[in-house]
Image (cartoon, rainbow, N blue to C red):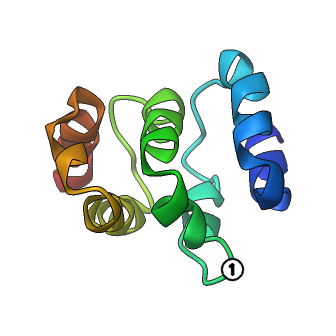
Amino acid sequence: RLLNLILETPDSFLDIYKHVMPYLGKIDSGSLFMFRLVKDDKIFLLEKYPEEVLLLLDKVIGSKIEHYDHFLKDILEKLISAKPTIKNHPSWRRLKEIAED
């Protein structure tokens, strides 16, 4: 529900991000969060807040992801487009490994 709150209030992304991060847990395999994150009306979040989105994903994605791995790959590539140096971040590398498994 907290992830949905972030997506439902994109104009307040940073404020909500700061408040909900400590309370977030791992998403289950049926979560639509990554699918919703790459939809046209939310894609700007990846471009405007690449580091925050990366840390958010790192927090909610466990050691593997059974479904939506293609969405994770797409998100990671979009984060590189927005901020090329992000691929040097340990969280990005961890998520890239998960997306490729």
The N terminus, quarter of image:
top right
90 relative to 22, above or below: below
Residue 56 lies left or right of residue 23; in this view the side is: left
Q: Position of residue 76 (x, y in %)?
A: 31, 58
Local packing at callout 1 (Cα closer than 10 Å; few below 14, some 14-19, many 20+) is few
Q: Position of residue 56 (x, y in %)?
A: 53, 36
Observer-nearest residue: 20 or 34? Answer: 20
55 relative to 45, above or below: above
Residue at the (41%, 67%) spot, across then down: 71
92 relative to 47, above or below: above
* Image quadrant where residue 94 sits: top left
77 relative to 15, above or below: below
Q: Residue furthest top?
A: 22
* Image quadrant where residue 24 sits: top right
Q: Position of residue 58 (x, y in %)?
A: 42, 33
Residue at the (44%, 58%) spot, across then down: 67
Q: Which residue is mark 1?
A: 41
Kind of residue sitting beneath label 1: Asp
The image shows a total of numbered marks equal to: 1
Residue at the (60%, 40%) spot, across then down: 28
Q: Position of residue 46 (x, y in %)?
A: 49, 61
Q: Under tag 1, what secondary structure?
A: loop
Residue 62 lies left or right of residue 83; in this view the side is: right
Residue at the (46%, 36%) spot, across then down: 61
